[in-house]
Amino acid sequence: DSFRDSDRGSAGSLGGRACPWANRVTRMGCCASKPGVRGGRALIVGDAARGDNSPSSPEHSGEDHDHDEFVDAFDTIDDGWGSDGGGGAGRTPRASVNGTSGGLSLSPVFEQMANSPFHDLTPQEQVKFVERDGGIPYELCRDAWSQERHALRINELVNATKERVAREKNVDRAAANVTKRRMSRDEEDPPEMSMYDQAKGVVGRMQMGQDITKFELPATFLTPFSAIQASEDVLTIIAGTERSDKEWRDMSDTETCDVEQRFLNVLRLFLDMESLRCEEGTSGGTRSAFTMPPMKKPINSVLGETHRTRVAPHVEMVAEQVSHHPPITCWEVEHALAGLKITGNLSPKPIFHGTSVQVALRGTLLFEFQETGETYLAQIPDLYIRFFGLGGGYNENVGKVRFERVSGGTTGDATKLWADCHFKPRGSAGWKSKAHRMDCTVYREDCVGLVCCDTGNDVSVSSIPGTDSPIAAGAGVVGLGFGFLENFGDKSCATFQSAKAASRKFAAKNFVPEKNTTNVQMLLSLKGHYNSEVRNLVTGELFWQAAKRKRLNPVAATVPIDLETESHLVWGDLIKSIVKEDWKKANLAKKRVEVAQRALMKEIKEGRKKWVPRLFQQGQKTHLGVISGMYTLKPNVRKEPPECDSDWHEMIGKAVFEDL
């Protein structure tokens, strides 16, 4: 209950209550709040905690700081300290890297932080320390960057990583920071442009139909989260909505549900996941924390960026940016109690249309049930972002996608099932009355044996398009995986052409039988709104209703794979600056990462570096035919993640984790 109280107030008193999280001393370890005490925090909160005459007070440092927020320990340096000892009697200057006195003095807070035992741990030991501490907690279904406790702890870990990198580079952070401050005071800031002028300049350089993936935008057009963090949306449905244990079991229970019922239950879960992108939320009260205001986009994830989130002990998401050009984000959510794994591969391609941007997500979702081996594949519809219009600005799903059963696993049932879904746009006028409409038709094709051949005839053995070896009966492959090939396949290769020729024509409504489709039957014709409810068009019965939000949001935790590639840390300075609307620092933080990434990409492009994704790998699902081309999580990664790539650390880590 104390966690869900309002975040207003100091770090130690949230919403009028004492906060046990903020008062813990021995659980964090990256900064010491008392000399000789392991595991404290270098937090400066409020004048009452500092004292008016404290060296870290605004009066002493000559700078204004917001109360009740994390203050970088370097902000407490007395820039007026001189070699004659004036103004700082009784304090010992820190020795510079060459062993001589740098004429600088540190506040007691920084001295304690720099000498914290946490900094003496290896990077792997630091990660294990944070993981034992329970990670970095926050309230799910809300934007983590606005939650004080999460932001404070992220800042602590960012500072700890900066300290470790500085020690590795043999750099005196205090001296470097003061030098930067003095240089910045001598520089004149360029006049600030209004948001309108910036937007006018950016839009003026774009062309209709242009792919803006590589188009650099100033920080004022960025949201305070990266593309890989937006993958957390799936957790809002998996862990943040009311779904009973029976509903989870009914997706894979072969004793109580037949193959059609199981398929339709998983289809309902898919619709729940797609409903989240409604900007105003769903009728069940669920709403994404990663909606994008007009003229805003997520931060482009850097190559090798990782992210891990846990909700209770049973749900965990792991994500990685496996490619930068083209951008490919991979994630896997494991629900241990439901025995379900959902893997997502997304390669977004935003296209500029003047008054709007259509983001072709080119995404594929793989649903795997561990008990039965049944597997389902789904395409992800595009995201359409309208800046302005008669109905105002809005976000919505658009496009035609297919949801199909691709493997019967060990069930022994070779029935082929698929659903064609059409997420309809509002039209050029953008009227709200036409928002969130969809049509869907569910089909069934019976096959004898466990593999359905390309012609639709009943066989017991068949080969997967693009492979030379036949798949014996019992392998359980019943679908073609056309959705994956459509997004990630080479459209010029024989595999794609064969799958396309064998795939049934898309028909979200008004099914017309094709040749050789005597064994194909239409099960359901659905129509409705994907933010509220979808009904059977023939009977009028309710098929799907938006999932209800839990009365209390669950507590999640960011659990870093390491303290460099974790998304919240690698973009820590940028996110913090965007939230504070400090656009000068935001642009510096953004450029710093981009320049470092270009150096790594140059090594890869010129053949001096071979990039291998750290957490995900292709070719692991060989039993699923062409779907084996998907990136899926490597074995044992959740328990024993591999170390950070050494070149990534040298080129990106050392450049990013410096003081602005």
Image (cartoon, rainbow, N blue to C red):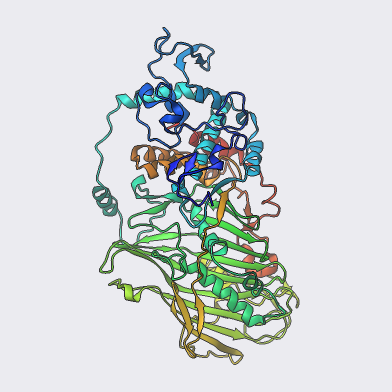
Q: Is residue 23 above or below residue 265?
A: above
**Residue 301 located left or right of residue 129:** left
Q: Is residue 192 above or below residue 358?
A: above
Identify the residue shown where x is 46% and y is 77%: 533
Q: Nearer the viewer, residue 245 or 317?
A: 245
Residue at 61% across, 90% down: 519
In this orientation, does residue 184 appear? yes
Q: Position of residue 273 (x, y in %)?
A: 51, 67
Along the line of sight, the residue nearer the viewer: 2 or 553:
2
Give the image quarter of residue 624: bottom right
Which of the 4 image quadrants contains residue 246? bottom right
How many callouts does the rendering have? 0
Residue found farthest to the bottom:
518
Residue 453 is at least partly visible in this image: no
In the rendered image, which quarter is residue 56 located in?
A: top left
Residue 268, given in percent of the width and then of the height, sits at 55, 74
